[in-house]
Image (cartoon, rainbow, N blue to C red):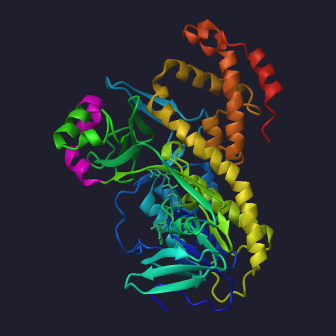
C-alpha cells in the first residue's frame, strides 16, 4: 500500500480517475459518496503539501452552475470562505475613467472570485476524508489501451503500471493524455482549435493588506483587439491577466524587451503600470499560456469517459470552463443515481458494498451522459468565443450599454420570457447552455427590432420612451415560450 492510500473494508466497485484537478477531485468525492472505491491519480505532487503550479490561472470566476454541483457534494460550507463576490464588470477606459456595469439587477446575481489552488485543496481534502478514496500523486498517465480497457501510469521513480479501466474517468485537463491516446489509436476524433491570442498573469500587490482596486468587481481594461482583466484575491492582491495576440503590432511577440513592456503598459494601462512596481520583471518571469477549444467525439471508448476540460476545454472569456466541468460532475452523478447508486454523505468506514454497474451499464451511462452534455458544451464553447469580442471591445460601445439596459428592463417586466443571455449562463443553472444560446439568438433579434427607433440608436431617449413595451410583449409572446 502506498502513502495516502486508504484501506477499503468491503469490496466496492473500483473507479479510476485520471487527474485530481477541479473536476477529478469533485467527481471522486461524488462517486465515493455513492459507495464506489475511488482511485484518484495526478501527475502533480500532493497539493496539500506543495506549492501551486505556476502558469495556470490563479483565480477563477465561480458561478451558479459550479455552485450547484459543489452543493450536491455537500462542501459549500468549506468553499464559501474562499469566495469574493463580484457584482459586475468595472470598465477602465484608457483615459482613466471607470464605470461599473452590474451583472444582474438582483442582489444575488453575482459571480465569485476563487483561488484555484485553495479550491482544489478543499476538494482533495474532502475526497481524501471519505473512506474508499485512495490518492496517488506523482502518477502520470502515459496512455490507455486502444479500447479503453487499461490506463498506463508512470510514477515518480519511473516505474510503470497498468490499471484496469473498469471504469476510468479522464479528468486530466485540456492537454489530456487519455484523449491524445484514444485519438491516436483512432477510437475517437479530437481536435484542438488554438486561439491566436495568448495570456499572461501578473500580480497586483495589496496596499497595506487592502485591495488596490474596488474589491467586489471583475475589472476589465478593454482595448479593442486585446484586454487586461483582474480578479480579487482574499489576501488583498489581484491577479491580472493580459490577453493579447501572439504576433503583430500589439502582441506578445512585440514585447520581448523589458523597455517595450513598460512602454506598452504606460501607453495602454497607465493605472496598472502604477500599481505593479516590478511589472517588467513579472512579465519576463511569468509564463505565457495558450488557449484552445477542444473538440472531441465521442467522449467515451470502452469503459473510459472523458470529462471536464479533457472532453471540451473552452476559452476562458465567459468564465465557464470550471463551471461546465463541475456541471459535468453533477450530471454524471445524476446518471449514476438513476442507475441505483445511493448517496452516503458521511465518511463511511466499513460500509457495505456499494453499487456495482456492469460494463454494459457503464457504456450506456457514458452514452447517456455524452448525449446530454455535448450540445450544451458546444453551446458554451461558442458563447465563450463570442464573449471575447464583447469583453475586449463592445463593452465600451454606448449602443451596447443601452441595449444591455433595455435587456434588464425587459427582464424586470417579463421575467418568465426574457432573461439576458449572460444571466442565463451565469445565474440560471436550470437553463441548459444550449437553451441559453438558442433563446439568446431570438432575444438579440427582438432587441434589434425594438431598438430600430433612431431616437434609441442616437441615445436621445431612455429605453422606456424610445421602445414600445407593448410591441416587446407581443414579440416575446410570439417568439419565446415561457421559461420553465
Ligand atoms: P484541470 O483543472 O486542468 O485539471 C487537470 C488535472 O489533471 C490537473 O490536476 C493535472 O495535474 C492532471 N493531469 C494532467 N495531465 C495528467 C497526466 N498525464 N496524468 C495524470 N494527471 C494529469 N473557468 C471558470 O469556470 N471560470 C474562470 O474564471 C476561468 N478562468 C480561466 C482563466 C484561464 C487563463 C484559463 C486557462 C482557464 C480558466 N478557466 C475558468 C477554465 C478552468 O481552468 C478549467 O475549465 C478547469 O480547470 C477544468 O477543470 P479540469 O479538472 O477538467 O482540468
Predominant SS along the magenta part: helix
Picture quarter with the C terminus: top right
Q: Residue at coordinates 61% horizontally, 7% vertically from top-left?
A: 454
User: Relative to 77, is 225 on the left or the right?
Assistant: left
Residue 223 vs 235, above or below: the answer is above
The one of 54 and 410 positioned closer to us in this rendering: 54
Q: Is residue 254 visible?
A: yes
Residue 70 vs 293, above or below: the answer is below
Q: Is residue 237 visible?
A: no
Q: Residue at coordinates 72% horizontally, 25% vertically from top-left?
A: 413
Q: Residue at coordinates 58% horizontally, 69% vertically from top-left?
A: 185
The one of 170 and 479 positioned closer to us in this rendering: 170
User: Relative to 360, is 467 on the left or the right?
Assistant: left
In this view, the residue farthest toward the left is 259
The one of 410 and 168 positioned closer to us in this rendering: 168
Image coordinates of residue 56 in percent, x first then y, are 40, 57
Q: Residue at coordinates 37% horizontally, 64% vertically from top-left?
A: 52
Number of callouts: 0
Residue 460 is a magenta residue: no
Q: Which residues are magenta?
A: 267-286
Amino acid at each position: 500500500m502506498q502513502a495516502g492510500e486508504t484501506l477499503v473494508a468491503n469490496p466496492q466497485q473500483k473507479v479510476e480517475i485520471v487527474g485530481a484537478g477541479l473536476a477529478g477531485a469533485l467527481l471522486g468525492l461524488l462517486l465515493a459518496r455513492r459507495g464506489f472505491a475511488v482511485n484518484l491519480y495526478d501527475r502533480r505532487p500532493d497539493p496539500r503539501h506543495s506549492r501551486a503550479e505556476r502558469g495556470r490561472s490563479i483565480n477563477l470566476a465561480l458561478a451558479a452552475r459550479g455552485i450547484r454541483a459543489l452543493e450536491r457534494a455537500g462542501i459549500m460550507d468549506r468553499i464559501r470562505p474562499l469566495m469574493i463576490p463580484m457584482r459586475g464588470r468595472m470598465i477602465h477606459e484608457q483615459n482613466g475613467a471607470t464605470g461599473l456595469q452590474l451583472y444582474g439587477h438582483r442582489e444575488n446575481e453575482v459571480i465569485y472570485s476563487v483561488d484555484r489552488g485553495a479550491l482544489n485543496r478543499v476538494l482533495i481534502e474532502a475526497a481524501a476524508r471519505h473512506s474508499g478514496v485512495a490518492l496517488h500523486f506523482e502518477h502520470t498517465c502515459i496512455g490507455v489501451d486502444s479500447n479503453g480497457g487499461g490506463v498506463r501510469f508512470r510514477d515518480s521513480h519511473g516505474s510503470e503500471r497498468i490499471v484496469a479501466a473498469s471504469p476510468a474517468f479522464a479528468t486530466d485537463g485540456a492537454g489530456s493524455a487519455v484523449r491524445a491516446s484514444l485519438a491516436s489509436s483512432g477510437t475517437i476524433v479530437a481536435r484542438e482549435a488554438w486561439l491566436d491570442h495568448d495570456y499572461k498573469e501578473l500580480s497586483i500587490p495589496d496596499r497595506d493588506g487592502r485591495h488596490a482596486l474596488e474589491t467586489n468587481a471583475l475589472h476589465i481594461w478593454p482595448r479593442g483587439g486585446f484586454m487586461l482583466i483582474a480578479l480579487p484575491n482574499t489576501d488583498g492582491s489581484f491577479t491580472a491577466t493580459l490577453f493579447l495576440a501572439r504576433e503583430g503590432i500589439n502582441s506578445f511577440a512585440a514585447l520581448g524587451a523589458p523597455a517595450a513592456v513598460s512602454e506598452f503598459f504606460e501607453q495602454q494601462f497607465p493605472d496598472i503600470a502604477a500599481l505593479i512596481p516590478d511589472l517588467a520583471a513579472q512579465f519576463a518571469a511569468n509564463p505565457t499560456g495558450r488557449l484552445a477549444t477542444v473538440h472531441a467525439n465521442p467522449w467515451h471508448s470502452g469503459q473510459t469517459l472523458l470529462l471536464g476540460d479533457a472532453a471540451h476545454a473552452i476559452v476562458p472569456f465567459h468564465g465557464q470552463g470550471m463551471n461546465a466541468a463541475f456541471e459535468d460532475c453533477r450530471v454524471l452523478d445524476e446518471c449514476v443515481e438513476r442507475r441505483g447508486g445511493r448517496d452516503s454523505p458521511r465518511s463511511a468506514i466499513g460500509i457495505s458494498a456499494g453499487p456495482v454497474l456492469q460494463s454494459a451499464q457503464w457504456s450506456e451511462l457514458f452514452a447517456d451522459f455524452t448525449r446530454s452534455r455535448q450540445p450544451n458544451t458546444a453551446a458554451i464553447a461558442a458563447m465563450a468565443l463570442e464573449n471575447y469580442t464583447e469583453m475586449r471591445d463592445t463593452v465600451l460601445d454606448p449602443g451596447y450599454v443601452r441595449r444591455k439596459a433595455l435587456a434588464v428592463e425587459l427582464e424586470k417586466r417579463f421575467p418568465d420570457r426574457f432573461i439576458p443571455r449572460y444571466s442565463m449562463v451565469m445565474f440560471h443553472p436550470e437553463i441548459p447552455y444550449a437553451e441559453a444560446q438558442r433563446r439568446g439568438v431570438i432575444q438579440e433579434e427582438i432587441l434589434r427590432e425594438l431598438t430600430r427607433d433612431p431616437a434609441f440608436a442616437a441615445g436621445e431617449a431612455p429605453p422606456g420612451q424610445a421602445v414600445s413595451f407593448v410591441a416587446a410583449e407581443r414579440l416575446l409572446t410570439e417568439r419565446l415560450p415561457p421559461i420553465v
